[in-house]
Amino acid sequence: MALYYKSAKELAGMLSRREVSAVELTRAALDRAEQVEEKVKSFVTRTPDLALAQAEAVDRRRATGETLSSLAGIPVAIKDNMNTFGVRTTCSSKILANYIPPYDATVVDRLNAAGTVTVGKTNLDEFAMGSSTENSGFFTTRNPWDTSRVPGGSSGGSAAAVAVGEAVISLGSDTGGSIRQPAALCGVTGLKPTYGRVSRYGLVAFASSLDQIGPFGRTAEDVALALSAIAGHDRLDSTSAPVPVPDFTAGLNRGVKGLKIGIPREYLAAGISPAVREAVLRAVEVLVGLGAEAEEVSMPHTEYALSAYYVIAPAEASSNLARYDGVRYGVRAGEYSDLVDMFSRTREEGFGPEVKRRIMLGTYALSSGYYDAYYLKAQKVRTLVNKDFEEAFRRFDVLVTPTAPSVAFGIGQKTDPLAMYLEDVCTIPVNLAGLPGMSLPCGFAAPEPAAGVAGGGPTAGDGNGLRLPIGLQIIGKAFDEETVLRVGHAFQQATDYHKQRPALDAKGGARQ
């Protein structure tokens, strides 16, 4: 197996045994990007010089006999809404196209301290608003399994980079499913930690009560390694929780015997494709076969979560994005008649259609006469969703659901905003409740017909035998990422879905 497709755990062992150097591993990832980046378009900015300098530093430290982190020398990619000192951070928006931060986000600081190697900043839906990475202000990232299809979003670039071997680990942010949904569509493992587990300092805000940073990797073990590095209290983030950070890899091999798994029936209802439903239920059977107990549970307020989210998140976005006015930083309109005209023209030229849509929705929900009817009511619904989870976790250790309602859809296929918003129907409740959730591959299915798909890949029609990844979502109690990772690891020890790799052909398509 090529170096760039090995897990972080495997590579850590090879690095410590001097079977490969950090520079050799970094060159393998950079060379892989040279081969596939034009087809996949994972990155907004690539940083080969920085990566090689960091790798050389790791090799020098290792040569002295210094004890290094398990992640030292591992190539990582950073979603381009996290500040990186001296490297532009765009949020895939024209309004920040040339913004170069004067400081690192806390998570970037912590990865640097662990000795990781930064290979680039990844593409996203503009300001993390989307479920397909089609809303990027620059270009659409493509799914490595079939380049006529989306990788999911908003962290589509981070998921695709890991799936295709351009990075071993990547960071994404998750406001309503933006780590887990692209992890599902790209066939990798992605974790949204508990709200407050990982510092948001240096993350460009979308919806501050919902945003959380988390890792992508090939396996639950890789994700556990990354989480151990980035988690922990940060005095620079007022929402960062002062709770102890365990070694998330320590309990991975405890198995699932005796654990109680809840299967919320509302997550398997209408709108979930039959293939996804069957794959999730088969995954539950695997866990039961390993000694877990499973039982159906009802979470009656689930159906209201999507509506509540699309009031709360746009309202917070409206407030957070008010700072992009052409005065302090970012793009300013070239021509304007007065100050108000400058504000208007700057935002008109700098923001894309989806960002404008959410700002208008949020501003309306917060406006005089509508605050109580929309925003306040949505927050009350959020409380009911949270109570559903609290009740379920009195009986169960984890909950298991689909991650996304279907496999990856075609680029240009979902033009109706509501149809796109429904992509996050299984993930949004977890953000409203602030709980940890992880997606990992649990099967494959043929794509659904996608008439009029843009992109021209060889599988845009009937699928031609293509099989696309399906994601299993594991939801845990607040600050119990250990159990979520433990269940995911047990499942991956018993299956090989996570070992399947997309194979890009010469025409730019991909097949299993």
Image (spheres, rainbow, N blue to C red):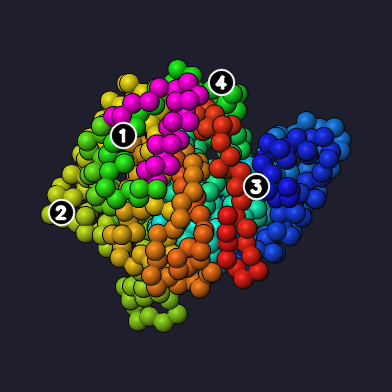
Question: Looking at the picture, does residue 234 appear above or below residue 123?
Answer: above
Q: Earlier in the sequence, mark 2 or mark 1?
A: 1
Can residue 106 be seen here? no
Q: Tell me residue 420's x, y (percent).
A: 34, 59
Q: State how far apart marks 2 and 4 are (Cα).
A: 51 Å
Q: Tell me residue 49's x, y (percent).
A: 74, 59
Q: State how far apart marks 2 and 1 are (Cα).
A: 33 Å
On the picture, is 406 further left or further right than 291?
left
Q: Which mark is residue 17?
A: none
**Tag 2 and tag 3, C-beta contact below 8 Å:** no
Q: State how far apart marks 3 and 4 are (Cα).
A: 25 Å
The residue tagged 4 is 254
* Secondary structure under the numbered disc 4 in the rendered image: helix
Can residue 15 be seen here? yes
The residue tagged 3 is 168
* Secondary structure under the numbered disc 1 in the rendered image: strand
Q: Would you call the spot at circle 2 few (<14 residues within 10 Å), some (14-19), or many (20 or more)?
A: few
- Identify the residue shown where x is 51% and y is 59%: 465
Q: Quadrant of residue 319?
A: bottom left
Outermost residue on the right side: it is 64
Q: Which mark is residue 264?
A: 1
Which amino acid does the dot numbered 2 rest on?
Tyr
Q: Which residues are magenta?
A: 276-297
Q: Earlier in the sequence, mark 3 or mark 1?
A: 3
Q: Nearer the viewer, residue 32 or 363?
A: 32
Q: Earlier in the sequence, mark 3 or mark 4?
A: 3
The residue tagged 2 is 370
Q: Nearer the viewer, residue 249 or 101?
A: 249
Which amino acid does the dot numbered 1 rest on?
Pro
